[in-house]
Image (spheres, rainbow, N blue to C red):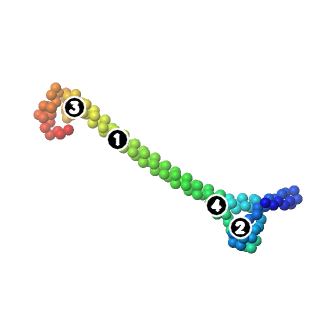
Amino acid sequence: MAATERGTQIEEFIVETCCNCGVSFCMTEDLKKQRLGDGQSFYCPNGHSQHYTNSNATKIKRLREELERERQKIAMLRSTNETTERRRRAAQGVATKRKKKLERVANGVCPCCSRSFQNLARHMSHQHPEFHG
């Protein structure tokens, strides 16, 4: 790194080497930071175009794309989770309904006419022969 003074301003220089011809040259630290950030081309003294491949802009773009993919995955998983939860609740409701119906039958309540009987089995065979619970 070299420094020069112009009036009262001191500029810092970075030494780079051309990837095509191997010549060493200087650029300001500010220009290097700018090219690292935007990924645009710069030239060696022999006119060879070059650029930094992993610019901050490229990294940020890649990270944003990755973040968007992760957000889409999360949205899909949330949707799947909500659907699964709705199905679970529906199945639980059906199971609860059946359980209550069986409890009523066990207590002698007819599932067809909701009347109570001492001998429910006899009532079902005589009054509701078509019923197959």
Give the Cα separation between the discs numbered 1 and 2. 65 Å
Which label sits in the foreground, 1 or 2? 2
Q: Which of marks 1 and 4 is in front?
A: 4
Q: Which mark is residue 112?
A: none
* Label whose residue precedes the other's in the sequence (2 or 4): 2
Marks 2 and 1: in contact by CB < 8 Å?
Answer: no
Residue 69 screen position, x and y as percent: 52, 54
Describe the element under mark 2 as helix, strand or loop: strand
Q: In whole angstroms, how far apart are the C-alphas of marks 4 and 3? A: 74 Å
Which residue is disc 2 drawn over? Answer: 42
Q: Residues within 10 Å of mark 4 (few under 14, many from 20)?
A: few
SS at circle 3: helix
Q: What residue type is labelled 2?
A: Phe
Residue type at mark 1 is Ala
Q: Mark 1 points at which residue?
A: 90
> Going by the picture, which residue comes out furthest to the left?
126
Q: Are marks 3 and 2 in contact (CB under 8 Å)?
A: no
- Residue at the spot of label 4: 54
What's the residue at 13%, 38% (across, down)? 129
Query: Could you say whether the residue bearing mark 1 is in a helix, strand or loop?
Result: helix
